Image: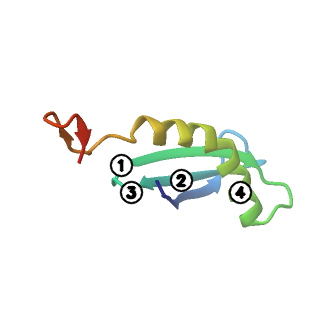
Amino acid sequence: MALTYQIDKYEVDSEDDTKTKVGFKVTNDSGNVLIIDKSVTTGSNTAEQIVTAAQADAQDEINAWDNATANVGRTWNPETNEFE
């Protein structure tokens, strides 16, 4: 399944001003949505480096969510015992 990552937050972390909080809205092919935020050290990093680090920090949780929702919304045929 392909995932779409949309940045829905990019701001200084209110709890630690040396970090940037990046929020992702992740959507899978079935239309299921996960909202996840990660804070990473800002330093002299570019926006791309900050987002890359935040995504790396979030990826295990994103993968677990994607696996858990893999069959949500699919149609089950009890006569054939298969997904349609």
Q: Image point 40% across, 42% down: which residue? A: 70
Q: Say the numbered circle drawn on residue 29.
A: 3
Q: Position of residue 10 (x, y in %)?
A: 60, 58
Give the foreground label among 1 and 3: 3
Residue projecting furthest to the left: 79
| One can see residue 14 in this view | no
At numbered mark 3, what does the secondary structure look like: helix, strand or loop?
loop
Judged left or right of residue 52, residue 77 is: left
**Amino acid under disc 3:** Asp
* Residue for point 46% across, 53% down: 1
- Secondary structure under tag 2 reads strand
Q: Give the labeled residue for mark 2.
A: 24
Mark 4 or mark 2, which is nearer the start of the sequence? 2
Local secondary structure at mark 1 = loop
Please give the residue where the numbered disc 1 appears in the rendered image.
Answer: 32
Q: Residues within 10 Å of mark 2 (few under 14, many from 20)?
A: many
Q: Give x and y (percent) for residue 45.
A: 82, 61
The residue where tag 4 is placed is 52
Front residue of this view, candidates 59 and 8: 59
Sequence-wise, which precedes: disc 4 or disc 3? 3
| Mark earlier in primary sequence (2, 1) | 2
Q: Amino acid at mark 4?
A: Thr
